[in-house]
């Protein structure tokens, strides 16, 4: 049954109706927008199908299977507009309704104004069923008019978009590829999210993975955003070290110095060109990486000289009481008390160079000589000082004293470039102190704090001055005090403006405090395990921190293979990029340790070895206090000797006075006895003198002769001495 033909003589009511004219104009506009949106969708589908076919071919070639048969070269402009029909979930099935292809276009409406036909109807009007083999899918990047997407009014069948089954045997579809979780729209969104301005320098992380790699969807991070910090997390053996190595190589190649701790020693391979293999080349080709072996300029350091690298030391004063308390495992009270000890040392000019200096100060304060000074400090009890002293002794006896001393390392030596402009990768060797994880993690924090102190403000630069990879970060935050965590958060928050980027490398994001995670702009999350209830809880917590995506992240994070990761970074506009399941690039350096002879040769050739190779023991608190105590001991000894001498002199004087007194008494008694004897003698003489009657000179009487004889005088003297005790012995 045919419809009646319109009467040409009848008046056209629509010609003068403004509402109808406006509706038709709006209809034409919407039709044009629909055509443009459908063309963009078909281009994205074609690109995804092409990338999937290339990946399948590369995969088949790597596994030794025959590659999919490619169609013969087209012989006409019509044929050049054809490509193979994609299969699987990547593109719609042939002959599908156009409504299903346009319903997912964001921003489109399904109802036009004023009774206009629906969007699906307009789409069907603009996409007539193809009737010839010339209506094959358009290529992702058309090079001729025959391959252009369809317009609202196609002028030739060669320009129609392909929706029909191919009829030529020369254009057989490629083998089905492994379906992925993303739709073509998702792939297009992710591709656009990681496409930056041509002037933006970027680091390539890898290619999008949607069942198979999508080489056309490269996942990148802007170089200027590396100072916004980041996180590389994942279970053991998932490829965190290789991710770190790849980032370090690209940063160094772009002139950015890098610092990283080499926990297991295998990161040293960055200094040696990599070794190609069929497996490696197949992987890199599949993700669109032009891999070639290349070495980076590397400097080796060793914590405290325990190892082969240039020694890195710190003074106790420079390390500070906060970090030292973390290393010693002190509680909050002991930590504040240690701060008082540092204050005392500074106030008294006592340089704390090594642990022996700090021990000397504590020993002095707890001694009899320092009790008064300890009391003046206030808040520091002798018991607390004793606990700190015991912890220091244990810490030093375990071999940790070699990490403190002089010359103190200047962290500015980490910010160096090679003569050819490449950044130098500084690797801190820590296998020698792996049994002291708290020490080396805290030491890394000390180096970061020193960088914050010496570097000037630079704002947002085109590239960072230094990127600092903080491996085994969970050891830093374990059992950390509130003050210590506050210091870390402040450093991470403010060091960005000084041109330093910090990437924490750990096992799960929950190892890093939320205040620190809030400062991180980029995340590379390798596989997580959920073997225990705690693991499952941590997994769910990790999933909850990601923006909405087309992935079931709780499942995907457990299915990631080695060298694969869920990535989201910060774009050059400061906005997060879409979440992308990424197969990461392979490092260009050796993925195993550099041989020891090569490391030793590099260390010997380092210009820093002469500066830091030999330790210095200058006068410090220990020597000052030792000299002070020695001087005090000498003064005390001299005073004691003086007192002893004075006491001896006094005793001598007393004894001499007693002797002199006894001698004087003896002399007096002797003189008295002699005087008495003389008087007795004179009396006897007088008595005997009157008995002589002759006038002539009388002769001596017998008594007189006896008394004057020597023997008589001797006898009389002995008798007198015996009576009065005046005889000298």
Image: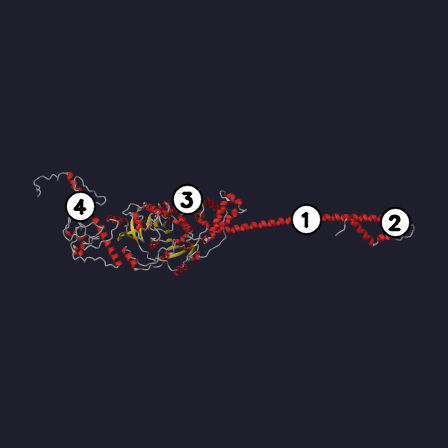
Sooner in the amino-acid sequence: mark 1 or mark 4: 4
Q: Is residue 700 left or right of residue 296?
A: right
Q: Which mark is residue 639?
A: none
x and y, in percent, of residue 559 in the image: 30, 51
Kind of element beneath mark 1: helix
**Label 2 vs label 1: CA separation?**
52 Å
* Number of other residues with Cα within 10 Å of mark 1, as a class: few under 14, some 14 to 19, many 20 or more: few
Sooner in the amino-acid sequence: mark 3 or mark 1: 3
x and y, in percent, of residue 281 in the image: 29, 58
Kind of element beneath mark 2: helix
Viewer-nearest of labels 3 and 4?
A: 3
- Quadrant for the N terminus, please: top left
Sooner in the amino-acid sequence: mark 3 or mark 2: 3
Sooner in the amino-acid sequence: mark 3 or mark 4: 4
**Label 3 vs label 4: CA separation?**
63 Å
Q: How is the image coloured?
A: secondary structure
According to the image, label 3 marks what residue?
482
**Label 3 vs label 2: CA separation?**
122 Å
According to the image, label 2 marks what residue?
688
* Number of other residues with Cα within 10 Å of mark 2, as a class: few under 14, some 14 to 19, many 20 or more: few
Q: Nearer the viewer, residue 186 or 534?
A: 534
According to the image, label 1 marks what residue?
653
Viewer-nearest of labels 3 and 2?
A: 3
Q: Is residue 652 left or right of residue 53?
A: right
x and y, in percent, of residue 243 in the image: 33, 53
Furthest-right residue in view?
694
**Label 4 vs label 2: CA separation?**
184 Å
Q: Nearer the viewer, residue 668 or 335?
A: 335
Callout 1–callout 4 Cβ contact below 8 Å: no
Residue 199 visible in image: no
Sooner in the amino-acid sequence: mark 4 or mark 2: 4
């Amino acid at each position: 049954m045919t419809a009646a033909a319109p009467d040409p003589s009848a008046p056209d009511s629509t010609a003068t109706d403004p509402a109808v004219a406006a509706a038709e104009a709006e209809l034409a506009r919407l039709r044009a927008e629909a055509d443009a949106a459908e063309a963009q969708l078909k281009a994205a589908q074609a690109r995804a199908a092409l990338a999937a076919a290339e990946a399948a071919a590369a995969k088949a070639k790597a596994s030794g299977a025959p590659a999919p048969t490619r169609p013969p070269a087209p012989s006409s402009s019509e044929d050049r507009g054809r490509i193979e029909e994609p299969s699987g979930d990547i593109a719609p099935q042939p002959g599908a309704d156009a409504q299903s292809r346009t319903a997912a276009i964001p921003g489109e409406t399904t109802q036009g104004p004023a009774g206009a036909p629906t969007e699906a109807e307009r789409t069907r009007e603009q996409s007539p069923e193809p009737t010839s083999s010339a209506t094959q899918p358009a290529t992702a990047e058309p090079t001729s008019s025959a391959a252009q997407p369809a317009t609202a009014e196609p002028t030739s069948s060669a320009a129609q978009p392909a929706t029909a089954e191919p009829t030529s045997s020369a254009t057989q579809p490629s083998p089905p590829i492994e379906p992925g979780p993303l739709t073509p729209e998702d792939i297009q969104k992710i591709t656009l999210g990681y496409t930056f301005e041509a002037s933006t320098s970027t680091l390539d992380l890898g290619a999008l993975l949607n069942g198979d790699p999508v080489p056309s969807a490269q996942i990148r991070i802007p170089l200027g955003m590396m100072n916004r910090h980041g996180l590389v997390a994942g279970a053991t053996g998932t490829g965190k070290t290789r991710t770190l190595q790849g980032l370090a190589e690209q940063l160094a190649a772009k002139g950015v110095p890098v610092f990283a701790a080499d926990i297991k020693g295998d990161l040293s391979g960055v200094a040696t060109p990599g070794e190609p293999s069929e497996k490696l080349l197949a992987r890199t080709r599949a993700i669109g990486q032009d891999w070639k072996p290349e070495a980076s300029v590397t400097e080796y350091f060793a914590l405290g000289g325990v190892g082969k690298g240039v020694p890195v030391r710190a003074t106790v004063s420079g390390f500070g009481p906060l970090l030292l308390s973390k290393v010693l495992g002190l509680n909050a009270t002991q930590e504040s008390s240690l701060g008082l000890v540092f204050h005392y040392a500074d106030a008294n000019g006592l340089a704390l160079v090594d642990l022996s200096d700090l021990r000397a100060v504590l020993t002095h304060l707890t001694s009899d000589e320092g009790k008064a000074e300890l009391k003046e400090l206030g808040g520091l009890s002798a018991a607390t000082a004793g606990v700190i002293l015991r912890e220091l002794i244990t810490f030093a006896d375990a071999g940790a004293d070699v990490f403190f001393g002089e010359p103190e390392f200047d962290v500015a030596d980490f910010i160096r470039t090679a003569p050819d402009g490449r950044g130098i990768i500084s690797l801190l060797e820590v296998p020698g102190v792996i049994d002291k994880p708290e020490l080396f993690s805290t030491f890394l924090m000390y180096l970061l704090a020193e960088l914050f102190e010496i570097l000037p403000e630079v704002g947002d630069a085109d590239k960072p001055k230094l990127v600092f990879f903080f491996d085994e970060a969970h050891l830093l935050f374990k059992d950390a005090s509130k003050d210590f965590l506050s210091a870390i958060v402040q450093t991470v928050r403010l060091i960005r403006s000084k041109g330093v980027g910090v990437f924490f490398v750990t096992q799960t994001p929950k190892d890093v405090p939320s205040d620190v995670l809030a400062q991180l702009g980029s995340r590379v999350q390798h596989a997580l395990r959920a073997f225990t209830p705690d693991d499952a809880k941590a997994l769910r917590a990790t999933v909850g921190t990601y923006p909405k995506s087309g992935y079931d992240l709780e499942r995907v994070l457990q299915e990631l293979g080695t060298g694969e990761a869920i990535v989201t970074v910060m774009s050059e506009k400061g906005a997060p990029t879409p979440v992308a399941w990424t197969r990461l690039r392979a490092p260009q350096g050796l993925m195993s340790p550099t041989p020891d002879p090569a490391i030793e040769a590099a260390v010997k050739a380092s210009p820093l070895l002469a500066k830091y190779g030999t330790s210095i023991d200058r006068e410090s608190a220990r020597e000052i206090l030792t000299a002070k105590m020695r001087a005090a001991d000498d003064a005390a000894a001299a005073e004691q000797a003086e007192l002893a001498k004075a006491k001896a002199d006094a005793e001598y004087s007393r004894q001499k006075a007693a002797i002199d007194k006894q001698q004087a008494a003896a002399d007096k008694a002797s003189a008295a006895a002699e005087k008495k004897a003389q008087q007795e003698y004179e009396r006897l003489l007088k008595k005997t003198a009157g008995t002589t009657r002759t006038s002539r000179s009388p002769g001596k009487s017998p008594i007189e002769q006896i008394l004057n004889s020597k023997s008589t005088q001797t006898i009389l003297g002995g008798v007198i001495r015996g009576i009065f005790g005046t005889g000298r012995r």
